Structure formats: C-alpha cells, structure tokens
Image (cartoon, grey):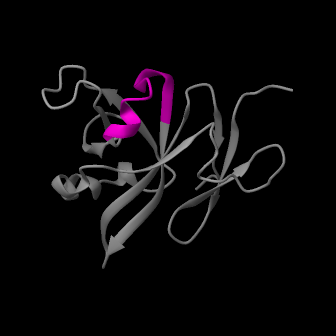
Amino acid sequence: MSDRVRLWLEHTRDGYRLRDAATEEPVSHDDPRIRVIKLAGVSYRLDALQDDGFQPGRRLALVPEPQNEHDPNAIGIWDVEERVQAGYVPAEIAARIDGDAWQAVALLAFYEGDRRVGLRVLLAPKDAWIGAPRA
C-alpha cells in the first residue's frame, strides 16, 4: 500500500471538508501528513481575496520569497495563475516546509456580508492526490 496522500474534497455550505479517498473517513486538520492553515496577511489584501481564484476548491500557487526582506522563509499564496496574491503561509509553518515541495487548495472561506475576509488553505505534499467534485 502506498504512503501517498489521497484526499477527497467534500463540498459543504462554506467550502470543503477533507475525506480519505481510500476509506472515505474524515481527515482531521491535525493529520501530520497535511497542514490546514489560516491565510496570513489577508487584511492587507482584502480586495485581492475577492478574486474568483480564491474560491474554496480552487488550486493555489505557493511562491517562496527567499529575497523577502522581512522573512527569507516567506511563502506567498497566489491564485493558480499567479496574477493576484491573497496572503502568506503563516511564518511558523513557512519556516518548517519547502514551498516547492507542497501544493495548496483553498478549503474554507469566511465572510462578512458577501465579502470574503478570510481563508483556510490545505497544504499537502506535491505528490498527494486531491480530488474534488466537478462543478
């Protein structure tokens, strides 16, 4: 049996919940094979966060910023086409992972009225299989 992470995104009212693709059992956000993070720095990029590229279920781009003057471990989170940045992987997580070895998916959005004001993001190893229902 392979150790490769295989996740299924199950649609909910506000986003997606994780299930193991093989067993269909729920996957905890505390599962050591993945990270579920709160998007950091989003308050500075609320307009960008409204972009359709950050809707739950969408793939995201992780962009390491080794030249970042405030934090050489910084990893920006962008829409998959790298047009718009919504925030960062929290510093304490970014310092412990290689942004080039992980993939990201928008998982759960938080709203004030009809405006997106926060986002939970799934980080999984680059070789993980992540399936989602077709729209």
Name which quarter of the figure residue 13 lies in.
Answer: bottom right
Q: Position of residue 6 (x, y in %)?
A: 71, 38
Front position in the image: 55 or 66 = 66
Q: Is residue 49 above or below residue 34?
A: below
Height in image: 54 above or below 77?
A: below
**Residue 80 seen by the camera:** no
Q: Nearer the viewer, residue 116 or 121?
A: 121
Residue sitting at x 35%, y 54%: 52
Of residue 28 and residue 47, the one placed in the foreground of this image is: 28
Q: Is residue 14 left or right of residue 67?
A: right
Residue 35 on image: x %, y %: 53, 43
- x 34%, y 34%: residue: 81
- Residue at the location (34% across, 43% down)? 90
Q: Is residue 91 above or below residue 18?
A: above
The quarter of the image holding the C terminus is: bottom right
> Is 115 placed above or below 127 here?
below
Query: What span is colored magenta in the figure?
Result: 91-103
Tell which residue pokes out farthest to the left in this image.
69
Q: Position of residue 64 (x, y in %)?
A: 31, 25
As drawn, the residue found furthest toward the bottom would be 113
Q: Is residue 104 visible?
A: yes
Mark count: 0
- Residue 128: image x %, image y %? 64, 31
Q: Was residue 133 drawn as part of the magenta stretch in this picture?
A: no
- Residue 35 or residue 83, whichever sits in front: 35
**In the image, 42: left or right of 22?**
left
Q: Quadrant of residue 71?
A: top left
